[in-house]
Image: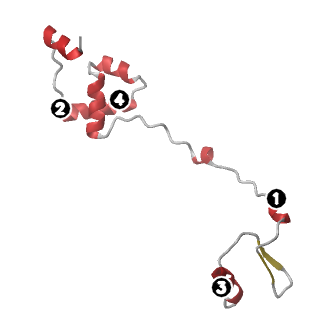
Amino acid sequence: MNLAMSRAQSGTVLPRRSVTEKKRLLSEWEQSPLKMNDFCKEKGISLSGLKTWMRQFDMGYKRKPRKSAAARFISLIPDRSLEMSVPFAAYILPDNSKLVIHQPVAATFLRELLYSPK
């Protein structure tokens, strides 16, 4: 026997709620530590009703707390094999220091680097 038939037979009718009341309940749900089913029982609302309001007003979704920037930080350790690899380009500067580029770069970048005004 479905719930609608049992309510119709028993004469139980859930009250219609205003938009303001629905939104208030959704806000309460967002802040509540209860499980959805327990919250609905406590407030006297149907589980399907709460889910419908969530979709209808696009609110009431419990979002997981964002991790802090420190928790999302990923430490990068350079690959030491680059030191041993064949460079993509090497350029001896006027003071005899060496500019070594290990990653492929566009020819326009090299041209700008070599012929830029000093």
Using the numbered discs, state the Cα–Cα distance from disc 4 to disc 1 in whole angstroms: 52 Å
* Mark nearer the N terminus (3 vs 2): 2
Amino acid type of the residue tagged 4 in the rendering: Trp
* Mark nearer the N terminus (2 vs 1): 2
Mark 3 vs mark 2: in front: 3
* Mark nearer the N terminus (2 vs 4): 2
Q: Assess whether mark 1 and mark 2 are in contact (beta carbons under 8 angstroms).
A: no
Using the numbered discs, state the Cα–Cα distance from disc 3 to disc 1 in whole angstroms: 28 Å
Using the numbered discs, state the Cα–Cα distance from disc 2 to disc 1 in whole angstroms: 65 Å
Using the numbered discs, state the Cα–Cα distance from disc 4 to disc 3 in whole angstroms: 59 Å
Which residue occupies 29% across, 28% down? 50
Q: Assess whether mark 1 and mark 4 are in contact (beta carbons under 8 angstroms).
A: no
Mark 2 vs mark 1: in front: 1
Which residue occupies 71% across, 54% down? 76
Which disc is residue 18 wearing? 2
Q: Which residue is under mark 3? A: 112
Where residue 79 sits: x, y (%)? 78, 57
Neighbour class for label 1 at 10 Å: few (<14), some, many (≥20)?
few
Note whether 27 is above or below 78 in the view shown: above
Q: Which residue is under mark 4? A: 29
Q: Assess whether mark 1 and mark 3 are in contact (beta carbons under 8 angstroms).
A: no
* Mark nearer the N terminus (4 vs 3): 4
Which SS class for mark 3?
helix
Which residue occupies 41% across, 34% down? 62
Which disc is residue 32 wearing? none
Which disc is residue 80 wearing? 1
Dividing the image into 4 quarters, which one contains the N terminus? top left
In this orientation, which residue lies closer to the viewer: 37 or 2? 2
